[in-house]
Amino acid sequence: MEKSKVYFTDMRCKMGTSLLEKMDKLLDKAGINQIDFKGKYVAIKIHFGEPGNLAFLRPNFAKTMADKIKALGGKPFLTDCNTLYVGRRNNALVHLDAAMENGYSPLSTGCQNIIADGIKGMDDIEVPVNGGVYCKTAKIGRAVMDADIIISLNHFKGHEGTGFGGAIKNLGMGCGSRAGKMIMHNEGKPEVDQSLCTGCKTCAKYCAQDAISFGADKKAFIDHNKCVGCGRCIASCNFHAIANNSGSSDELLNYKMVEYTKAVIDGRPHFHCTVVNQVSPYCDCHNESDAAVVPDIGIFAGFDPVALDKACIDAVNNAPAIQTSILSEREQKTNDHFTNIHPTTDWRGQISHAEKIGLGSGDYELITMK
């Protein structure tokens, strides 16, 4: 079987040449012009960034992608679905405000922003998952499914629940409606280690389900009847007092997310572009961004989201750790940066399950463009 082709360009720019010009040439080299865009609606799936986070993609990258699609005759729009957690993106009104605040406007990107699952996150379509093992159907934001073509434009980073976030997470988790996100998260419920809990109540601030209460001892308690397993409390705890002890929940989250990605791209043209810069240890859904863990690497593009993610993983793991980052604080038990940052997660489940259900291949040929 022929290896999937992944195209790459680094962040170096000769005098007089911008990184955005390099990205434009990379898109051509990777074959985006093989897609018939003429008169087609094109969903560019992107993460607008939680306000306060500064690691999300700059709107300039989105404009380069939108301009390319318009030049090829397409009708692009930027899109994302609402979040489960408390924040500035859990309904379309605040989500659009957040996007504008972070620089995503028609003036800066040349196309409109559309929140795919509507005002309250309930505007979705139930889509069959071809080959799904854990999800026979997926609840996807309607605007994503109304598009003729899907483009993934994403920022590569670490993630506390899935190990890393790349093309698969951008499409699978990102295109799930609020109901879809609950389905992906509902297998595991976190627990509080009472000996480590300081009663600071930060976790409760980030719980959208009002599932965390505090006893007379001021220790946190999670009501599993209310909890949907989104993991925001785990990420928000500064004292490592909250963990998912079910063992298999992160694994199942990865599997379901992969199957949601399959539902999103099956049956229509798709293309993927990943920017590996400011590789933060946590998701861009946080309203803060920790220091990058490796130096900026470059931009990857291709038709296979699995190959793209695997190429980005390998590139990050082959890069030197920045000594002032979280990597310098964590015990270096392996040569895998993602495992060292998030030892309770295993990103490999994304790749292996994606291959199993026919989403793509982790076996790739890297083609470098200068």
Image: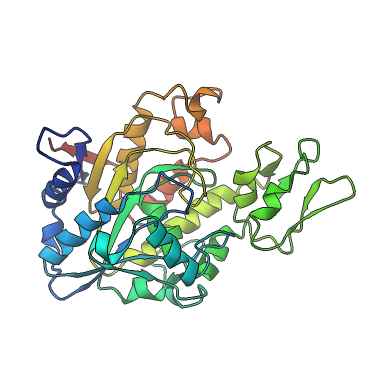
* Res. 62 image quadrant: bottom left
- Residue at the location (49% across, 67% down)? 94
- Identify whether 329 is placed above or below 168: above
- Identify whether 187 is placed above or below 326: below
The image's colouring method is rainbow
Indicate the quadrant containing the C terminus: top left, top right, bottom left or bottom right: top left
User: In front here: 241 or 325?
Assistant: 325
Residue at the far right in the pictured view: 216
- Residue at the location (51% across, 69% down)? 91
Percent of width and height locating residue 2: 19, 46
- Residue 307 appears anywhere in the view: no
User: In front here: 226 or 109?
Assistant: 109
- Does residue 4 appear to the left or right of 235 in the view shown? left
- Residue 105 appears anywhere in the view: yes
Percent of width and height locating residue 321: 41, 24
Percent of width and height locating residue 165: 42, 47
- Does residue 98 appear to the left or right of 310 in the view shown? right
- Identify whether 342 is placed above or below 45: above
Q: How many marks?
A: 0
User: In front here: 224 or 136?
Assistant: 224
Percent of width and height locating residue 169: 42, 53
* Res. 78 image quadrant: bottom left
- Residue at the location (76% across, 36% down)? 196
